[in-house]
Image (tube, rainbow, N blue to C red):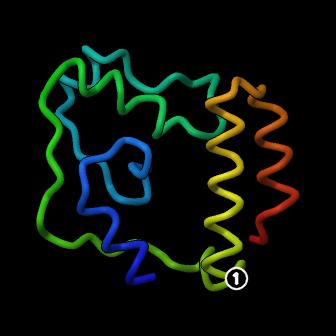
Amino acid sequence: MRLNAWFTRFDVDLIRFGDQSLFVTRSVFERAGGYREQLLVMEDQEIIGRLRQQAPFRVLSQAVVTSARKYRENGVFRLQAIFTLIATLHWLGVSQPTLVNLYRRLIRW
């Protein structure tokens, strides 16, 4: 988990996800077009590029604490592998229903 947290300090979209807490003003969010509600997974990754077109993006130095429940229940390496698979399939254009189905089958709640 510490290694995971360490990587979040880099301003790289590839590793930028919503569980890292994305803060954005309402005006920038609206100019970017908001979330695409048809996206059931990867909506955080999708919006980042549009947000960057509207305003500079900064990684804050302060820590944000989020739940590690999924990591504890699924295993850190296993969950990272699943997220990597789903992200890769998303970038390859796999449909949202297929990604959601995969997510629900592979990740323990």
Q: Going by the image, does 5 lie left or right of 62?
A: right
Find residue 27 and report its image quarter. top left
Q: Which of 36 and 15 is in front in this view?
A: 15
Q: Residue at 30%, 18% (x, y): give it.
A: 32
The image position of residue 6, as x and y in percent, is 31, 73
Q: Residue at 70%, 82% (x, y): give it.
A: 73
Q: Residue at 23%, 46% (x, y): give it.
A: 23
Q: Which of 94 and 66 is in front in this view?
A: 94
Q: Is mark 1 on a helix, strand or loop?
A: helix
**Residue where numbered disc 1 is placed:** 73
The image position of residue 12, as x and y in percent, is 32, 46
* Viewport quadrant of the C terminus: bottom right
Q: Residue at 45%, 27% (x, y): give it.
A: 35
Find residue 7 and report its image quarter. bottom left
Where is 74 relative to 36, above or below?
below
Count of labels in the image: 1
Q: Going by the image, does 16 lie left or right of 94?
A: left
Find residue 69 and report its image quarter. bottom right
Where is 22 relative to 37, above or below?
below
The image position of residue 67, as x and y in percent, is 47, 75
Where is 107 relative to 17, above or below?
below
Crowd class of label 1 (few under 14; some 14 to 19; many from 20; radius 10 Å): few
